[in-house]
Image (cartoon, rainbow, N blue to C red):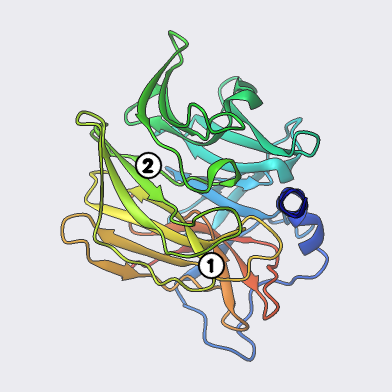
Amino acid sequence: MTETFIKIIHGVLVLSFVALSSTCCNGPSDSGGNKINPYIKEIKFSDPKLSPNFLMAVWRGNAIFAIQGLSKFTIDNQYNVVKDTLLETDIKWENWTYIDANEAGTKLLLIEYKYDSFYDIPTTTLYEYDFQSNRLQPLYDKKSNISTARYYPHDDTKIVYYSFGDSLSNGAGYYLRDKITQQDTLLFPYLSSAGIWETLHGFDIHPSGGLLLVPINRSSGRFTHEKSPKIGIASLKKQTLDTLDVNFDFILNRTGLYLRYNHDGSKILYCCFPDNAYGYVTNGTSEVGIIDATTLTKTILDVDTYGKGLGSIQLAPNWSPDETAIVYGSGEVRLDGTAGIRHLYILTKLN
């Protein structure tokens, strides 16, 4: 009964984060704390009344697409916003938990997350938004339980996605979806130890299409935080999973990983984030950095947007098109472990 109660609370916290946090938070400030990195620039709407919670964003050309309030920002070469648009859909914006874009920036992959209190499980739906038709179309319903999806490199008719399987985790793994033939192929069977409760499984596919970056969550179960995560490399040809010799400090329940290759696979952008990073009580901050894929040298980036209290939390940073900057959502983490609303930022210098 206690475990069921905790699960219900988890689902409620994930989906009610915005309502709780928006009543008690301000913008970034370095008052009374450390100096904020001068190369951090906030991206926001010209209308101050529009201030949705920004968990993550992707960057294509001169356009940045963000959630949870599904938004599009057009920026100039100095990272100034020249046009902003809040995209209207029938989905409650607080239910969006993931976004990706094709290389041309004409299509988006979006995941809607809901908590089913009757069955005591989370459910997800994968959508595709097409800017040419201005249509939002579901690709998979809640039965697929997809937590993360990526367009296949150089071919947006195919999608690689991770599914945590059914309520018993049957069928968990990485799949390839051919949108033309409507066929699904299991690429690599894998079940994260976080199971069905892993809201974000931050995997990526190598630009060559032959390898997967696998975020290995090493908690032994729900609400147990025993080890820091590891990065796995899955060979789709050999069907093997190896781990990289890269370590992360196990600070304040950092159990999750979000990973992104650069254009040629020579670098890996990462975010090591705490359990319940989507929720109101995160009890910790994140670590963001870049890993050299050859030497495995790790460079930690200063992405802190508050400089006081515990600092700030990030979830899913993404590269700029020229890979000289990153875009990310970030929010304050207070001394009591609660998180403020997330704002959208660009780190304009990576060294």
Q: Which residue is mark 1?
A: 253
Left or right: 91 as drawn, with respect to 209: right
Q: Residue at x 30, y 69 (%)?
A: 299
Tell me which amino acid carries mark 2: Asp
Residue 36 image offset from top left, x and y in percent: 52, 80
Q: Residue at x 28, y 63 (%)?
A: 246
Residue 324 image offset from top left, x and y in percent: 33, 59
**Secondary structure of residue under mark 1:** loop
**Secondary structure of residue under mark 2:** strand
User: Of marks 1 and 2, which one's residue comes earlier in the chain?
Assistant: 2
Farthest-out residue, bottom: 32
- Residue 78 makes an appearance in the image: no
Left or right: 293 as drawn, with respect to 145: left
Residue 163 image offset from top left, x and y in percent: 50, 32
Q: Residue at x 44, y 53 (%)?
A: 217
Residue 305 position (above or below residue 154): below
Among the 4 quarters of the image, the one containing residue 161: top left
Residue 349 image offset from top left, x and y in percent: 37, 67
- Residue 14 makes an appearance in the image: yes
Tell me which amino acid carries mark 1: Asn
Farthest-out residue, front: 1
Residue 232 position (above or below residue 91): below
Q: CA distance from mark 1 to mark 2?
A: 23 Å
Q: Which residue is mark 2?
A: 204
Q: Residue at x 35, y 57 (%)?
A: 230
- Residues packed near mark 1 inside 10 Å, few (<14), some (14 to 19) or many (20 plus): many
Farthest-out residue, top: 181
